[in-house]
Image (cartoon, helix red, strand yellow):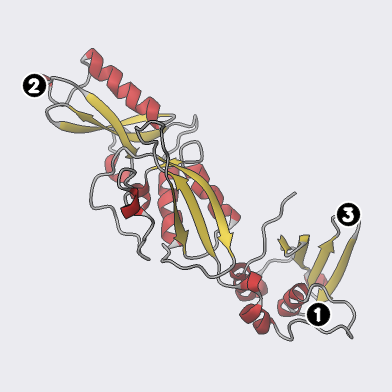
Amino acid sequence: MNYPRLYRNHVLEWLDEANTWPDGTTKEFSFRSYGHISLALHEDNAPFRFELTLHHSFRTDGQMTWCFRNIESALLQIFNNFAVDPATPREYESLQQALDHALELAPVKTLVTFLTPTLDTLPPIQREFYFLLDRALSHEEQEIIRNSLEEGKYFIPEQLGLPAVSPVNYKSASFSCAVEIPLPKTRPQNKWCQLLKMEMLPSPQHGSAVSADAFVARCSELQKHISENGERPYLVTVQTTTSDDAVVWASNHLEATATIQELCNKGDYCPDPEHIVKCESSCIGYALDTDLTAENK
């Protein structure tokens, strides 16, 4: 089993919240080459309430356990590589020293990489882009992001507050992002991108970063309209001599586009029936609260 790595944001969060943890709270994580560590609060062990356990990977029943009066001492034990012999020099004399100098505890950002739509070239080309979030993401936040996206990976950058990606003039779009995420001022285009991975970066990185809180909030908004059978509302634009938007419930954006296109071909849906020459539809994103009405919710 892979346990989440311990980063600076976890340390700062635990230092702030440990005294309010309910009895029995347990945090499981990994750090450096130590694959499984657990930190638990046991009130009945007072004053040594914080129990730190190093689980040996080479023995299923092997472990070493220490008990501490406070969480600072427990964390310092981890950063000093679980030094047991008092005579052994320790790398850090205080928790603050570890936070200031340990590479693994440097301020963390999240690198998110994704692919742009395939270019209509021979051979077909996809461009890889990235953006930085201003902090590490928790496992729960990563799940929110993936669960909010179609098949866990498809999205349109503008809908998540990211700069528009231009696969044609891709050099001008090599990632440069403001710290704040503004609401898109223009309609999203039919540019569905594919999320590749989210990586925590323990060392300082160059380049501006977007707000992780705002990004996760945007993803949460997408997630709340998913139905029990996995369908969600998509916004499909229909173009004839005029343009109109329709909300279609479907399992993916290709199905949403095909549904409207079939209705157009049959003449059952058309924004401008008197002047129709050719009807073309494309899915321009997920339907949001502002797009939904009582009729299509």
Residue 239's place in the image compared with 288, above or below, is above
Q: In which quarter of the image is the C terminus?
A: top left
Can residue 241 be seen in this snapshot?
Answer: yes
What is the spatial separation of the Cα atoms under label 3 and label 2, in whole angstroms? Answer: 74 Å
Q: Which of marks 2 and 1 is nearer the N terminus?
A: 1
Determine the secondary structure under disc 3. loop
Contact between marks 3 and 1 (CB within 8 A): the answer is no
Residue 279's place in the image compared with 76, above or below, is above
Give residue 105's position: percent from left, percent from top: 63, 72
Q: Earlier in the sequence, mark 3 or mark 2?
A: 3
Observer-nearest of 295 and 211:
211
> Residue at left 41%, top 31%?
123
Give residue 269's position: percent from left, percent from top: 22, 21
Give residue 176's position: percent from left, percent from top: 36, 60
Residue 180's place in the image compared with 146, above or below, is below
Q: How crowded is mark 1: few (under 14 residues within 10 Å), some or many (20 or more)?
A: few
Check disc 3 and report the residue beneath it. 58
What is the spatial separation of the Cα atoms under label 3 and label 1, in whole angstroms? Answer: 32 Å
Q: What residue type is labelled 2?
A: His
Q: In this view, does 197 lie to the left or right of 268?
A: right
Contact between marks 2 and 1 (CB within 8 A): the answer is no
What is the spatial separation of the Cα atoms under label 2 and label 1, in whole angstroms? Answer: 81 Å
Observer-nearest of 197 and 39:
197
Mark nearest the camera among 3 and 1 is: 3
Q: Which amino acid does label 1 sit on?
A: Pro
Q: Which mark is residue 275?
A: 2
Extreme residue in the top direction: 266
Determine the secondary structure under disc 2. helix
Q: Is residue 193 left or right of residue 98?
A: left
